[in-house]
Amino acid sequence: MTAPWDEAAAAQALADERRRQAAALAEKARQLLVEAEEAQRAADDAQLQADAQKRMANVGEELGELSVLGEKAATALCGKLSRSFSELKETAAIRAEQLRLGEEDARGFAYLITARSLPNLEFLSLARNALGDAGTAVLAQSLRPDVPLRHLDLASNSIRETGAAEIGRAMKRGALPLLRKLSLKNNDIDDHGAVALFSTSHDNVEWLNLSHNQIANSGGLSVSRALADRHFKCLRRLSLDHNQLGDKAMDALTSALSRGTELTELYVDFNPASDDAIQAVQLFFEDEAEPVYSRSQHGQSTCSWVSNSLKDTCVCQ
């Protein structure tokens, strides 16, 4: 007959053994889980690497396609300009006005700039074409600090907010370090475009032409702040005539001018502001230029400024 304490000891031993087995199984399960997680991570890493390699390959293919398309666009552009690639490398001035150039031709210019095929270009006039916002953005994004542009004319190209903003970004990143004259005349730049353009700064621009656009009070306030804060330190001539500037914008310009400015010519005629507000701005330039007034058949004031320093006549440009 087995003693009670022997039965208890045997039961205790059996329980201990089962606990050890359970612990061993738990440890084994933990190890298997760790191995499974490591395998999953390895699989994920491999997949991520495969995905990254695939993306890089796609990017490479896209860049290759863009390069081919850009080269084709540049070749077509050379035909429109009647100049070869080698001739463009030597040229300092391109006047391509009213040639119906569009976004694709802007890509051609972008390719030439990126390929450093315009190393001597100082004068570029693309006025009266059809670049639009898209073409202007393509061109502006391609501009580089090593392009020695001094004169850029993009007048009459249906440029709106996006195009103006991209030009501002190009100036902000220093892509046009030598630029002296920028013409955006006769486009569709509104307050948003003006704010984007004047939120940047440029130390060398001397003449900025924004006449015949849609800039109203908000844009005028942005211009005034830029003048007051000396964002354009060398600006001498600014054209804002034929816009939508009201008295609020004119008052802000008057306030900015009262703090001192390097401007010698500021055109603000043919805006819906009152005559008094416009004349308050013009009074700052009596010493620099002689105001000559005439009345149009509709009774609207026409102001011509005869610049004493430049010895030329500028009629509301």
Image (cartoon, rainbow, N blue to C red):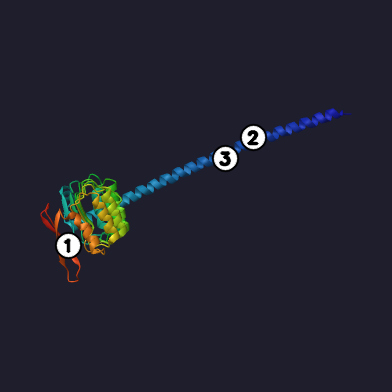
Graded by Cα atoms within 10 Å as few (under 14), some (14 to 19) or many (20 or more), the crowding at tag 1 reads many
Q: Residue at x 68, y 34 (%)?
A: 23
**In the rendered image, which residue does mark 1 sit on?**
303
Q: Residue at x 54, y 40 (%)?
A: 39
Three-letter code for the amino acid on which mark 3 is drawn: Ala
Please state the horizontal and vertical placement of residue 95, each as a whole percent of the image. 17, 56
Left or right: where does residue 56 sit relative to residue 147? right
For the view shown, which residue lies furthest in the right direction?
A: 1
Three-letter code for the amino acid on which mark 2 is drawn: Glu
Quarter of the image with the C terminus in it: bottom left
Tell me whether the residue at label 1 lies in contact with that at label 2, contact meaning CB atoms closer than 8 angstroms.
no
Q: Nearer the viewer, residue 196 or 276?
A: 276
Q: Residue at x 14, y 55 (%)?
A: 289
**In the rendered image, which residue does mark 3 sit on?**
36
Three-letter code for the amino acid on which mark 1 is drawn: Cys
Q: Is residue 74 visible?
A: yes
Please state the horizontal and vertical placement of residue 4, each as a whole percent of the image. 86, 29
Graded by Cα atoms within 10 Å as few (under 14), some (14 to 19) or many (20 or more), the crowding at tag 2 reads few
Query: Is residue 1 depicted above or below 183 in this figure?
Result: above
- Residue 215, quarter of the rendered image: bottom left
Label annotation for residue 27: 2
Left or right: where does residue 75 sit relative to residue 31? left
Q: Is residue 67 visible?
A: no
Dot 2 falls on a residue whose secondary structure is helix
Query: Is residue 207 depicted above or below 297 in this figure?
Result: above
Left or right: where does residue 243 sit relative to residue 92? right
Please state the horizontal and vertical placement of residue 42, each as a whole percent of the image. 51, 40
